[in-house]
Amino acid sequence: MSGNSAYPDTGGGLYTREYASISVSNSIIANSAGGACGGTVSIAIATDSIVDDSSCSVATVADPLLGPLADNGGATLTHALMSGSPAINPGSSVNPTSTDQRGFAAVGTRDVGAFEVQSLSVSVSPDVMPENGGASTGTVTRSVLIDRPLEVNLASSDLSSAMVPTSVVIPAGEASATFAISAVDDTLADGNSISSISVNAIGYVVGSATVTVVDNETPSLGLTLNSSSISESGITVATVSRNTPTNTALNVSLSSNNPTRLVIPATVEIPVGAAFVNFNITGIDNTTLDADQLVTIAASGLGSVTANLLVTDDDDDDADGIADNADNCPSTPNPNQDDFEGDGIGDACDNDIDGDGMPNQYELDNGLDPRNSFDRDADPDGDGFTNLEEFEFSTDPNVPNPDDDNDGIPDDALVDTPQRRFPLPAILPLLLDE
């Protein structure tokens, strides 16, 4: 009995008057107005009954955890017993019936009251699946076949390993329904895991089965650098990480293949509860022009892993703000890196800025333009020798220098065999043959 009011103004689930005699067993009295028992004559309540207050002697006092009055099968409405109800399988019973009010047979020890909780079972196939793309099928089955659908709640004990839908419906007239179980692929090398797949519904005993998810990762370290290169006076941050559980600390050994170029700690610790730790990498500054170098950094502790860092030489002998290894005039300040002829030698240290074969000072001394390569072919004194040839013969390009013997050498030449850059004029061999 639930929600009963047996006598006006006095109330109670049961109310007795004189000469009345009531004996109650294997029953539930709860949610009554004015108390469970009342009246002038005692009511014989067996100890296998459950009452939600102390107004009835002998009976077990407890909240029976009843569901709402509903169509739970059978010819009449009933209150289902909720999960955890003390009315489920309480032990021995006085004069128990073989079926409940709905006509459903007892499952194990007869439950107290009008409702017998039925059972749900679940099976998983396959019960072992890989973490990467693994899938299984669960089948939930009810112990009693009725002409009403049943919504069954589903749960996984480890959602980081196996996922299930929130519920599945067993259709009316059907005993079972299937649902998908999918493996969760993570990046952790945390070993195989066992998840319990449970099924429950109002008025049914919870059922469960297990599925094993096989891990597909190998314990390993990761090593990343914030920068791909640093100058030899620079600094960067590196991160070493692990793919294993973080319930213990992990010591990681560090090294490089060139300790003369980088400073790194010998070891770092990834602390409890952390998947990674950062550490500094510092370049070693020197005054040697030693070129850029690719340095390999190694970390070990769960296997080993490496990363490369380019260390660039930043020595600047001429203090022009350009590192020597990138300076087109490493010993002469040339902050703008001017290079008129594009030969890779900066104008500040290039003896022949325009690349015409005549030194800058020679051109300036003789009124020529150090930034005009075409003036090498000019002949301002009209003696038949170009400015370049005058330079090669060490003669004055502005004063005519005859060649009386037609040997291709100015009479006033200081050298007899200059390193010519161009052949003699075409007419000269003809003159020499005469």
Image (tube, rainbow, N blue to C red):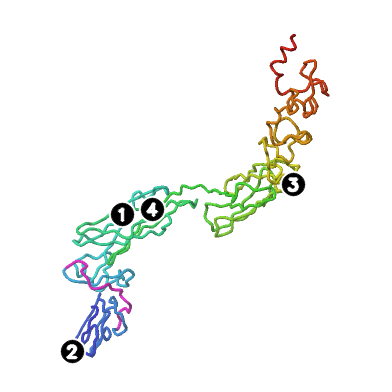
Identify the image quadrant of the N terminus.
bottom left
Q: Position of residue 194 (x, y in %)?
A: 42, 54
Task: Name the residue tied to disc 1.
Answer: 179
Q: Contact (CB < 8 A) between labels 1 and 4?
A: no
Separation of residues labelled 4 and 2 (CA atoms): 63 Å
Task: Name the residue tied to disc 3.
Answer: 286
* Dominant secondary structure, magenta: loop
Helix, strand or loop at disc 4? Answer: strand
Q: Residue at x 70, y 20 (%)?
A: 423
Q: Nearer the viewer, mark 3 or mark 2?
A: 3
**135 in magenta:** no
Task: Name the residue tied to disc 4.
Answer: 211
Would you say 287 lies left or right of 3 here?
right
Q: Amino acid at mark 4?
A: Val
Q: Position of residue 389 (x, y in %)?
A: 75, 25
Residue 424, relative to residue 133: is it above or below? above
Q: Amino acid at mark 1?
A: Phe
The segment highlighted magenta reads 57-74
Separation of residues labelled 3 and 2 (CA atoms): 113 Å
Separation of residues labelled 2 and 1 (CA atoms): 59 Å
Q: Contact (CB < 8 A) between labels 1 and 3?
A: no
Task: Name the residue tied to disc 2.
Answer: 19
